[in-house]
Amino acid sequence: MSENPKIDNKELDLNMSELGIREILKLLPHRQPFLLIDRVIELVPSKSIVAIKNVTYNEPFFAGHFPHLPVMPGVLILEALAQAAGVLALNSPEIDLEGKEHLFAGIDKARFKRMVVPGDQLRLEIETDKVRSSVITVHARALVDGEIACVAKMMSGITVVK
């Protein structure tokens, strides 16, 4: 695997309202099969993001979850939301990430309202609730065709990784 050519968030063009897979790969350390967002269609730095995950039958988790009824695991829907929140945090100029990492820190009030199956397109919507020097809380929801699949309140932290 190639090394992640990480971008310092101070180098980002915060006027971009959309990000393709190349920009996402520069921002997030995740790689296939664990990269769970395909593109960003709306981005308001420090405030909100809308990302897309195209769910296909080729996803490796469908082989075992469940062969007779392929359903995207809820924890992976939450992970997709967390990755979208990570992109938002990395596009927040008030957060100093120099020499630090952005990590998922917690989840509250997660609820699953609809199954996500092959052929669905997940719309991942994140809105910032609070931004502190080292903790960010967001309201997150995943939708399919305008119908809520998952809602949660999520938290991430900025930390020095040794």
Image (cartoon, rainbow, N blue to C red):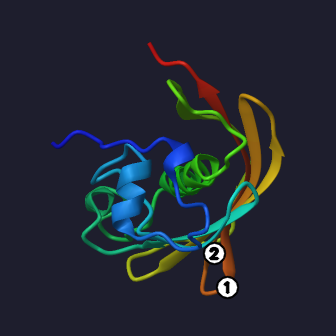
Q: Is residue 125 visible?
A: no
Residue under numbered circle 2: 143
Helix, strand or loop under label 2: strand
Residue 146's tag is 1
Looking at the rendering, which quadrant does residue 118 occupy? Answer: bottom left
Spatial CA distance of label 1 from label 2 is 6 Å
Q: Which residue sits furthest top?
A: 162
**Left or right side of 35 for 152:** right
Looking at the rendering, which quadrant does residue 159 occupy? Answer: top right
Whether 31 is drawn above or below 70: the answer is above
Residue 113: horizontal and vertical position, in percent? Answer: 68, 68
Helix, strand or loop under label 1: loop
Looking at the rendering, which quadrant does residue 64 occupy? Answer: bottom left
Number of numbered discs on residues:
2
**Left or right side of 115 for 113:** right
Badge 1 amino acid: Gly
Q: Which residue sits furthest bottom?
A: 145
**Left or right side of 154 for 40:** left
Badge 2 amino acid: Leu
Are dots 1 and 2 in contact, CB under 8 Å?
yes
In what quadrant of the picture does the C terminus appear?
top left
In what quadrant of the picture does the N terminus appear?
top left
- Label 1: how many Cα within 10 Å (few below 14, some 14–19, many 20+): few
Q: Is residue 78 visible?
A: yes
Residue at left 47%, top 56%? 73
